[in-house]
């Protein structure tokens, strides 16, 4: 089991559940003693005590379950929150969506099933075995010899279960990711008459996932059968000699009953642990992938320095995405001085947008460092750093809210006059003020009421209002007509005034705002050059 899995649960909860497991072990012994005496002596005076022991045992089990359920729900929410905060560029992938939705739902059964059962399996069998030793040492030896067989067989089958479950989870992620991508490109598929083909592809992937799921279920049923068989044989090895000795008069009835009652109680926790471990195997696959993403993240808690604006230095930075042999950026080095406007140019896929994603903390470098005033970006508080950065992406997201609220996204406390000033600076006021309700006009989902150029100018106004010392523009003029490009370039020039800026650009209108051009090709910086005045 991944040691970090236990770290998801608060230590006081684990200690409390462990103490309750010990209490259950003691109550199991008391219950067996009282029941054996009540039957052997036909004395109803033991029954109230027996009922009390049963009630206390049930209460301890309920209390442990309630504690672990609440803690597991909090842990799942925390992992989901951390993944969403730190995953960066993976957010938009379908496989990541599957992980944080359907995937993390498998984490809760793992925490509520495997973890408490592990504590019970550690606490209860030794207590029961000690009591068996005092009652009948020969039976205790048989039980002690049988106990290691259960985790041994469970581990052998568990290796197979792990592989099968990882295979199943990989199919589910692939199916979820492909389905999301198909939905995103459904219009294009229809235009090119490929919708039916993709429907068939999804059908095949769903069938592969079905077969993988059935394989995982077969393995789970096999593990249950094997563990049940081992337990039954162990109990039989104790029960048969006990019966023969009882018939021969070599054993008292109360002792025989006690041994027969306690033997299953020593083995059941181990069998239940194996069963629950196999049932939670999907959760283990999810945990491993989640920790892998979090370990790649640059946003690690604690000990972060306060973010400031200043010189930005890329020092031999290499970025390689998972599953790709060729790096997106390969030993990239350059410096952006305070107040300087730098344009990044190069062919599509050269790694220009990755530079911006690195500065936003969406992507972590495989090697090298990004220094802000001499401090490694990984040592900065990422939230404070992002408050110092304004970002205008190629496809800005506008919410189904008022124009003013969309402009205020980075500065929610801004007044209406400041919103108007930002809109004027971004050359957005000319079309916003023509709306029936002006800045209080509600936009459709993703700003469907506006043209591409108008959406970009709203995003530029948003960046202006945030008043961040560093501005990042990611090809904001791509796919705009000449009029929209000219208006956007004018608004960008206003926004970039007196600020440090890195602009990914192809069009001359935006390049004219830059002090220097850095050309990137194939993930490598080719030649920085000054822009002619």
Image (spheres, rainbow, N blue to C red):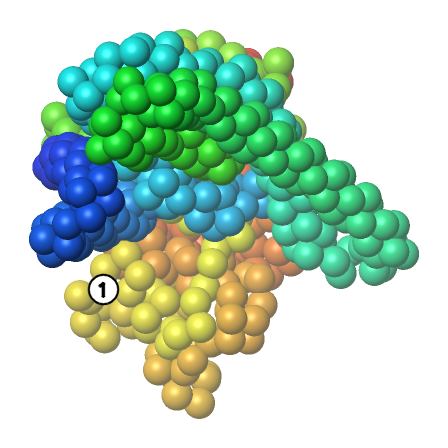
Foreground: 521 or 241? 241
Foreground: 491 or 525? 525
Which residue is rendered at x = 82% and y = 53% of the image? 199
Q: Position of residue 224 (x, y in %)?
A: 54, 33
Task: For the N terminus, give its image quadrant.
Answer: top left
Q: Is residue 51 visible in the rendered structure shown here?
A: yes
Q: Is residue 142 above or below residue 447?
A: above
Which residue is rendered at x = 15% and y = 54% of the image? 44
- Horizontal arrangement in the rendering, residue 227 relative to residue 496 (left or right): right
Foreground: 508 or 261? 261
Which residue is rendered at x = 38% and y = 76% of the image? 402
Q: Position of residue 22 (x, y in %)?
A: 15, 32
- For residue 140, which quarter of the picture? top left
Foreground: 73 or 257? 257
Which residue is rendered at x = 28% and y = 18% of the image? 250
The mark tally for this picture is: 1
Q: Which residue bears the numbered disc 1?
A: 412
Q: Is residue 402 above or below residue 323?
A: below
Q: Position of residue 81 (x, y in %)?
A: 32, 46
- For residue 427, which quarter of the picture? bottom left
Q: Position of residue 122 (x, y in %)?
A: 25, 24
Q: Is residue 152 above or below residue 508?
A: above
Q: Is residue 144 above or below residue 441?
A: above
- Horizontal arrangement in the rendering, residue 173 relative to residue 253 (left or right): right
**Mark 1: secondary structure:** loop
């Amino acid at each position: 089991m991944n040691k970090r899995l236990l770290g998801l649960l608060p230590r006081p909860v684990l200690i409390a559940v462990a103490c309750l497991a010990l209490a259950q072990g003691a109550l199991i012994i008391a219950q067996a003693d009282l029941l054996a005496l009540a039957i052997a002596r036909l004395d109803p005076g033991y029954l109230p005590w027996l009922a009390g022991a049963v009630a206390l045992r049930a209460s301890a089990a309920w209390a442990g379950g309630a504690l672990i359920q609440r803690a597991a729900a909090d842990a799942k929410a925390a992992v989901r929150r951390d993944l969403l905060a730190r995953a960066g560029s993976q957010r938009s992938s379908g496989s990541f969506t599957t992980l944080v939705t359907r995937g993390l739902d498998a984490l809760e059964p793992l925490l509520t099933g495997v973890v408490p059962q592990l504590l019970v399996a550690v606490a209860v069998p030794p207590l029961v075995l000690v009591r068996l030793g005092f009652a009948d040492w020969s039976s205790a030896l048989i039980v002690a010899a049988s106990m290691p067989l259960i985790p041994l067989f469970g581990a052998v089958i568990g290796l197979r279960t792990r592989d099968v479950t990882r295979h199943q989870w990989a199919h589910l992620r692939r199916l979820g990711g492909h389905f999301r991508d198909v939905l995103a490109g459904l219009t294009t598929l229809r235009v090119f008459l490929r919708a039916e083909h993709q429907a068939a592809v999804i059908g095949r992937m769903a069938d592969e996932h079905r077969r993988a799921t059935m394989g995982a279920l077969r393995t789970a049923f096999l593990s249950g059968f094997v563990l049940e068989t081992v337990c039954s044989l162990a109990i039989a090895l104790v029960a048969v000699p006990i019966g023969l000795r009882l018939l021969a008069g070599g054993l008292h009835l109360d002792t025989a009953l006690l041994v027969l009652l306690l033997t299953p109680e020593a083995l059941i926790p181990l069998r239940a642990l194996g069963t629950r471990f196999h049932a939670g195997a999907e959760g283990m696959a999810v945990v491993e992938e989640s920790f892998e993403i979090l370990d790649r993240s640059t946003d690690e808690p604690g000990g972060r320095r306060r973010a400031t604006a200043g010189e930005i230095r890329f020092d031999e930075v290499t970025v390689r995405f998972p599953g790709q042999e060729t790096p997106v950026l390969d030993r990239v080095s350059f410096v952006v001085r305070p107040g300087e406007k730098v344009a990044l140019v190069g062919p599509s896929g050269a790694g220009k947008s990755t530079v911006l994603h690195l500065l936003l903390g969406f992507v972590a470098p495989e090697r090298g460092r990004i220094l802000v005033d001499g401090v490694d970006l990984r040592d900065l508080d990422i939230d404070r750093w992002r408050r110092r950065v304004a970002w205008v992406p190629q496809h800005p997201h506008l919410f189904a809210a008022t124009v003013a609220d969309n402009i205020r996204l980075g500065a929610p406390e801004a007044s209406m006059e400041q919103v108007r000033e930002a809109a004027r600076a971004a050359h957005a006021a000319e079309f916003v003020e023509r709306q029936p309700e002006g800045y209080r006009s509600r936009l459709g989902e993703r700003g469907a009421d506006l043209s591409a150029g108008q959406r970009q100018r709203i995003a530029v106004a948003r960046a202006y209002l945030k008043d961040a010392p560093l501005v990042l523009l990611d090809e904001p003029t791509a796919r705009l007509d000449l009029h929209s490009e000219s208006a956007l370039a004018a608004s960008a020039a206003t926004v970039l005034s007196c600020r440090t800026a890195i602009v990914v650009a192809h069009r001359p209108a935006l390049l004219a705002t830059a002090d220097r051009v850095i050309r990137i090709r194939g993930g490598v910086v080719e030649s920085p050059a000054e822009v002619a005045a």
